[in-house]
Image (cartoon, rainbow, N blue to C red):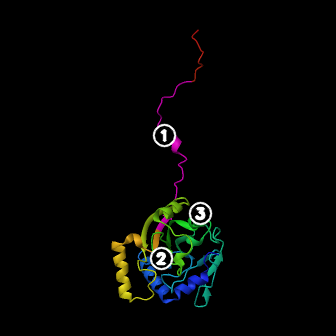
Amino acid sequence: MLYDVGKIDAFYNSTRGQMVARLLNKELLKIWTPSNKTSNLVVGFPSIFPERSAMFPVLMPSEIGGMPWEYENVVYSALIDSTSWPLESDSVDYVLITHALEFILDKNGFLLEASRVLRSAGKLIMIVPHRGGLWSRAETTPFGHGTPFSKRQIFSLLKNTGLNPEKCTRGLFLPPFVDKLPRIFSNQVEVFGECLLPLLGGVLIVEANKLVYAEPNKNRVAAKKRLFASVKSQSAYSVEE
């Protein structure tokens, strides 16, 4: 196990972890507003769950281990094989992956499952450590373990597994050694970093959709215009009598 779920949970129970969760939560809500009218799924560790009052299923890959994620005495989490999700194909509108892909050994198999369960009009959102950021070097945090990614690397993985990357933004511009900052100041640092130091973001926030191929038109051949006039069948060796 590369980095277990207990260590991730301990980080987010710390002052620094709570600050990180708040900042990433703010970025996530810009692109995803969970609704009871859509089917939603979280894969990994739900540290930045947008709304605790609206709980959704949480799948925790065996690479990080599992723990109960509950609300009002109901457990919403399950431990899974990262390349075999216990869900039907084309069944989920939104899939949020966080603290998962970087720890998965078979990344292609993992993303193929994400593509399989996602509906054709659905959206995949992933938060992964940024290779060029400071947080991927901070071993006292979950972001300093597993495989960090560049934008090019994550886009290549998505395209190879039937997913179409739409957008990639960066977040978490605070340095990883900061344990406690006033909320106003930390928000200002994030805005400053997003505008002036976008390449130094600690995480990549990636949005993707499912590649859907149109079925071939069976009547296409019949509908083609004739390019040549038809001729009567005649032997190549026939001669006039």
Q: CA distance from mark 2 to mark 1?
A: 58 Å
Tell me if residue 211 can be seen: no
Is residue 63 on the magenta stretch? no
Residue type at tag 2: Trp
Q: Say what secondary structure mark 2 lies in.
A: helix
Q: Main secondary structure of the magenta part?
A: loop
In this figure, which residue is indicated by the disc labeled 3?
108
The residue where tag 2 is placed is 135
* Type of amino acid at the residue the image marks with label 1: Lys
Query: Which residue carries the number 1 mark?
Result: 224
Which mark is nearer the camera, 3 or 2? 2
Q: Which residues are magenta?
A: 207-232
Kindly report which numbered mark, 2 or 1, lies closer to the viewer in this rendering.
Answer: 2
- Asked whether the beta carbons under mark 3 and mark 2 sit within 8 Å of each other, the answer is no
> Given contact means CB atoms under 8 Å apart, are the residues at marks 3 and 1 in contact?
no
Instruction: List x then y, in percent, for residue 135.
Output: 47, 76
Residue 157: x percent and y percent?
53, 62
In what quadrant of the picture does the C terminus appear? top right
Question: Image height check: is 120 above or below 94?
Answer: above
Which of the pair 55/147 is nearer the observer? 147
* Label located before the other in sequence (3 or 1): 3
Q: Amino acid at mark 3?
A: Asn
* Crowdedness near tag 1: few (<14), some (14–19) or many (≥20) residues, C-alpha within 10 Å: few
> For numbered disc 3, what is the local secondary structure?
helix
Secondary structure of the residue carrying tag 1 is loop
Alpha carbon distance from label 3 to label 2 = 24 Å
Measure the alpha-carbon separation of dots 3 and 1: 40 Å
